[in-house]
Image (cartoon, grey):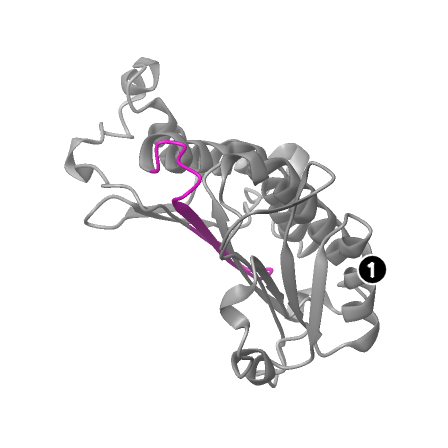
């Protein structure tokens, strides 16, 4: 949809789907102070039924609960933020503020006294291809992984691996074109973190990736980021086309005392 501007600044229309009245109203207030228009619904079905759904630039759903029942004594959470409009390059600064404010608000309201060993989280983000948007996403993912007890961020190279994946997808996959979306998903628990980064680029020949087990390849400039990912993560898998990367991280086990 056309980019709206107010006082020289880009503004957008945002739909918040959240069944907690307090959380819904709280985020709306945060985003309205930035000058954006916000609509509120409590359920996904209500959002889907709206005649004006296609008019929204951004949809934020399930900030706290996904409305589904927990299984196997687990606490299940989901969160999705999807940018459907507002992809013009001049809109990126405003979008950056929205994403940063939303993720910061979510971190303040999501955690209670839950037993984090029972929590499973699904995070789904669809964003224009701009690296300035990725910083807040990266910090948010690291916070969630640390909170669930999967890693100690200060002792992990997970930041490096995720950053390399984002840079490769934005710069090499989507050629930094904000009209092309980057989709980042994370399935998190205390046992493992599964990250998927997918771009809308042409992909590449996966068979040309140098052997990650050969230390000499780490000193080559070509493909060095991919090799870092392979050496940091427990599992790495590319789609056949090469535009979707799946990475798995698990807790590091301490070696038994001798």
Q: In the picture shown, does residue 223 fall above or below 186?
A: above
Q: Position of residue 66 (x, y in %)?
A: 62, 76
Instruction: Name the foreground residue: 183 vs 70.
Output: 183
Q: Residue at x 64, y 59 (%)?
A: 13
- The part of the chain drawn in magenta is 174-196
The C terminus - image quarter? top right
The answer, for residue 152, to whether it is visible in the render is no
The answer to whether residue 37 of the structure is visible from this angle is: yes
* In the rendered image, the vertical position of residue 227 relative to residue 197, given as above or below: above
Q: Quadrant of residue 46?
A: bottom right
Q: Residue at x 38, y 27 (%)?
A: 225
Q: Is residue 180 magenta?
A: yes
Asked whether 3 or 38 is in front, the reply is 3
Q: Is residue 211 left or right of residue 252?
A: left
Q: Position of residue 63 (x, y in %)?
A: 68, 66
Q: Residues within 10 Å of mark 1 (few under 14, many from 20)?
A: few
Which of 122/257 is in front?
122
Q: Which residue is mark 1?
A: 29
């Amino acid at each position: 949809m056309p980019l709206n501007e107010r006082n020289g600044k880009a503004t957008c229309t945002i739909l918040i789907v959240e069944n907690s009245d307090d959380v819904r109203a709280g985020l709306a207030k945060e985003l309205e102070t930035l000058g954006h228009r916000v609509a509120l619904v409590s359920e996904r079905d209500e959002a889907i039924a709206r005649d004006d759904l296609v008019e929204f630039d951004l949809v934020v759903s399930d900030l706290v609960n996904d409305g589904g029942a927990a299984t196997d004594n687990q606490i299940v959470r989901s969160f999705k933020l999807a940018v459907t409009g507002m992809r013009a390059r001049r809109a990126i600064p405003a979008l950056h503020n929205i994403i940063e404010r939303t993720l910061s608000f979510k971190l303040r309201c999501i955690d209670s006294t839950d037993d984090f060993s029972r929590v499973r989280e699904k995070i789904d983000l669809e964003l224009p291809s701009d690296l300035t948007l990725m910083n807040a996403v990266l910090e948010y993912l690291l916070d969630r992984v640390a909170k669930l007890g999967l890693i100690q961020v200060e002792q992990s190279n997970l930041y490096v691996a995720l950053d390399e994946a984002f840079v490769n997808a934005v710069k090499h996959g989507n050629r930094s074109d904000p009209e092309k979306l980057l989709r980042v998903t994370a399935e998190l628990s205390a046992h493992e973190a599964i990250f998927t980064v997918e771009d809308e680029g042409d992909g590449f020949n996966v068979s040309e990736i140098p052997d990650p087990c050969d230390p000499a390849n780490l000193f080559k400039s070509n493909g060095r980021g991919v090799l870092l990912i392979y050496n940091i993560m427990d599992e790495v898998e590319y789609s056949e086309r090469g535009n979707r990367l799946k990475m798995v991280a698990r807790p590091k086990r301490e070696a038994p005392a001798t």
